[in-house]
Image: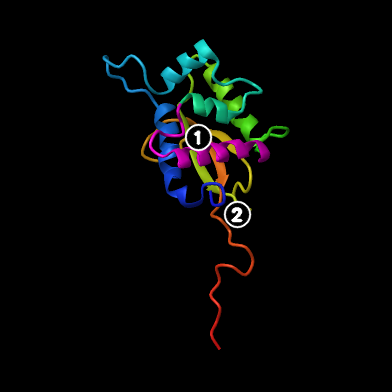
């Protein structure tokens, strides 16, 4: 995410993976008593991890969605998640942060919540989602025929300041 993640951009994919595994479809093995979306639903029912007015980043911290191996990348990732409070969403009157929290609250209030999937889209593409958080029910993984609650957050590479990053021509 450019300016916020800096040289830790390489960790964005694995950080999305943490969310996607934690909130994904549960495995059906008998010996597994908790995991995936059913575990998160149980935690939400018991502890109300996602609450109106509580920033998504605080819930992400509680669930350990910043990883364990790189504190700098974790803290930068939490800065990205906090930044979503300044970003609009596809829902009128909700910031990106509020949109995520409200969608998760609604999802986990269902008897059978959808698994959740988080991804990024290019915020520079005005023909696409642009600079806003988008939440929808769809099938984001072509090889898994299952509907998810998909959260797409805007990202872009760090844009160099004017005059920087361009090679000067030699005359």
Query: What percent of the width, then of the height, locates residue 1?
Result: 53, 48
Does residue 64 sit above or below 108 in this rendering?
below
Residue 72 falls inside the magenta stretch: yes
User: Which residue is farthest top?
Assistant: 46
Q: How far, Cα to Cα, is label 2 from label 1?
A: 23 Å
Q: Residues within 10 Å of mark 2 (few under 14, many from 20)?
A: some
User: Which residue is farthest bottom?
Assistant: 171
Which residue is disc 2 drawn over? 124
Looking at marks 2 and 1 on the same chain, the residue that comes earlier in the sequence is marked by 2
Q: Residue at x 56, y 71 (%)?
A: 166
Q: Which residues are magenta?
A: 64-87
Kindly report the secondary structure that dominates the magenta region of the rendered protein.
Answer: helix
Quarter containing the C terminus: bottom right
Does residue 12 sit above or below 146 in this rendering?
below
* Residue 44 visible in the shown view: yes
Mark 2 against mark 1, which lies toward the viewer?
Answer: 2
Q: Residue at x 47, y 38 (%)?
A: 74
Which residue is disc 1 drawn over? 138
Circle number at residue 127: none
Q: Residues within 10 Å of mark 1 (few under 14, many from 20)?
A: few
Q: Residue at x 54, y 25 (%)?
A: 59
Q: Are marks 2 and 1 in contact (CB under 8 Å)?
A: no
Query: What percent of the width, then of the height, locates residue 116?
Result: 47, 29
Residue 104 falls inside the magenta stretch: no
Q: Residue at x 54, y 19 (%)?
A: 49
Does residue 21 sit above or below 79 in this rendering?
above
Where residue 87 sits, quadrant-wise, is top right
* Residue 141 visible in the shown view: no
Where residue 70 sits, quadrant-wise, is top left
**Closer to us: 84 or 78:** 78
**Closer to us: 12 or 161:** 161
């Amino acid at each position: 995410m450019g300016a916020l993640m800096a040289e830790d951009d390489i960790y964005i994919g694995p950080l999305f993976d943490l969310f996607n595994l934690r909130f994904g479809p549960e495995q059906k093995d008998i010996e597994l008593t908790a995991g995936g979306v059913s575990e998160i639903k149980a935690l939400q029912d018991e502890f109300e991890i996602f609450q109106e007015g509580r920033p998504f980043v605080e819930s992400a911290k509680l669930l350990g969605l910043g990883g364990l191996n790189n504190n700098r990348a974790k803290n930068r990732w939490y800065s990205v998640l906090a930044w979503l409070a300044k970003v609009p969403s596809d829902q009128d009157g909700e910031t990106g942060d509020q949109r995520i929290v409200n969608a998760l609250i609604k999802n986990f209030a269902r008897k059978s919540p959808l698994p959740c999937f988080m991804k990024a889209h290019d915020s520079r593409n005005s023909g696409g989602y642009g600079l806003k958080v988008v939440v929808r029910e769809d099938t984001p993984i072509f090889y898994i025929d299952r509907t998810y609650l998909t959260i797409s957050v805007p990202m872009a590479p760090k844009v160099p300041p004017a005059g920087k990053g361009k090679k000067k021509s030699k005359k």
